[in-house]
Image: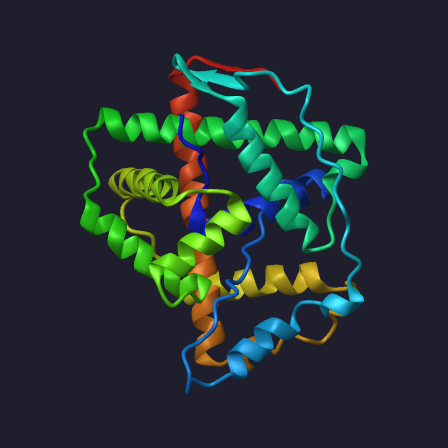
Amino acid sequence: MKKRIMLTTSLAFALSLGLTACNGDGEENGEADDSEEAQGESQEGEDQASDALPDEEEMEMPEPDIDLEDVPDPVAEVNGESIDKAEFEQMYTSSVEQMAMYGMDVTEDEEQEAEFRGQVAEGLVAQTLLTQAAEERGIEVDEEEVDEELEEQMELAGAESEEELFQLLEEQQGMSEDEVRDLLEEELLVEQLLAEEFGEVEVSDEDIEELYEQQMAMMEGQEGMEGDMPEFEDMDEEMEEQLRMEAESQQMEENRAALTDELEEEATVEIHV
């Protein structure tokens, strides 16, 4: 079985799961990418985005206690297809470690950690349902499309070559080059399925402003974040484009959830965690 992770949204996935587990609300939070801009470009928007996060020196980094000895294998079955323990461990560990970088530790509370396990398993089930649906519809992805996606991933990660990107993902996610390519192919299958089902994602200026207000509300009262975001009218083009991308990502996730719910009604799913 292939390890499954949405490379373009892995951090957002981890943080959204963590916020749900820590806060008990289903609210999603789009996160800005940490990609570096090319030499010579203006740094103003980048500075505004980085200022929205607390300094690393001010943030106490937790050390999660990851113990998955009791996780069954397989973790779940979806229409006869197994999701094995190795897949679950990869996604769980990656998500927990990325959340720790943002000061969150879901392992410190037993009930919270159990809920988080269930959310990770449900995420893997959802991805399996969508991939199965794409394959049933005869959707295919060719090597050229995977290569183009790799180029986008390089830009997002600030990598100067595919080799650097693969090395980064191996260090952070423990994935080989073949696994990365397989995962990208799988995610592209799902993207095409969603486009076929819902059409192209479009967001309005009102959607962008709404997302801005949501982020401002989440930042209110958080230590080190007060007053760091500019007024909506004062944002530069780079930051506005970042919000647009986040709004599009949010809409895609809503579409993904809606289709997953529909597929799950007709599916045979068993989750063991």
**Image: 105 above or below 218:** above
Does residue 24 appear in the picture of this structure?
no
Residue 92: x and y, percent?
A: 60, 35
**Image: 206 above or below 101:** below
Residue 13: name its quadrant: top right
What residue is at 43 percent from the left and 34 percent from the top?
258
Residue 185: x and y, percent?
A: 30, 41
What residue is at 55 percent from the left and 19 percent from the top?
75
What residue is at 34 percent from the left and 56 percent from the top?
202
Does residue 69 appear in the picture of this structure?
yes
Could you tell me how many numbered marks the image carries?
Answer: 0
Residue 125: x and y, percent?
A: 47, 26
In the rendered structure, the answer to whether residue 6 lies left or right of residue 118 reads left
Quadrant into which the C terminus falls: top right
Camera-nearest residue between 73 and 235? 73
Quadrant into which the N terminus falls: top left
Residue 39: x and y, percent?
A: 42, 83
In the rendered structure, the answer to whether residue 65 lies left or right of residue 39 reads right
Camera-nearest residue between 264 and 10? 10
What residue is at 66 percent from the left and 43 percent from the top?
18
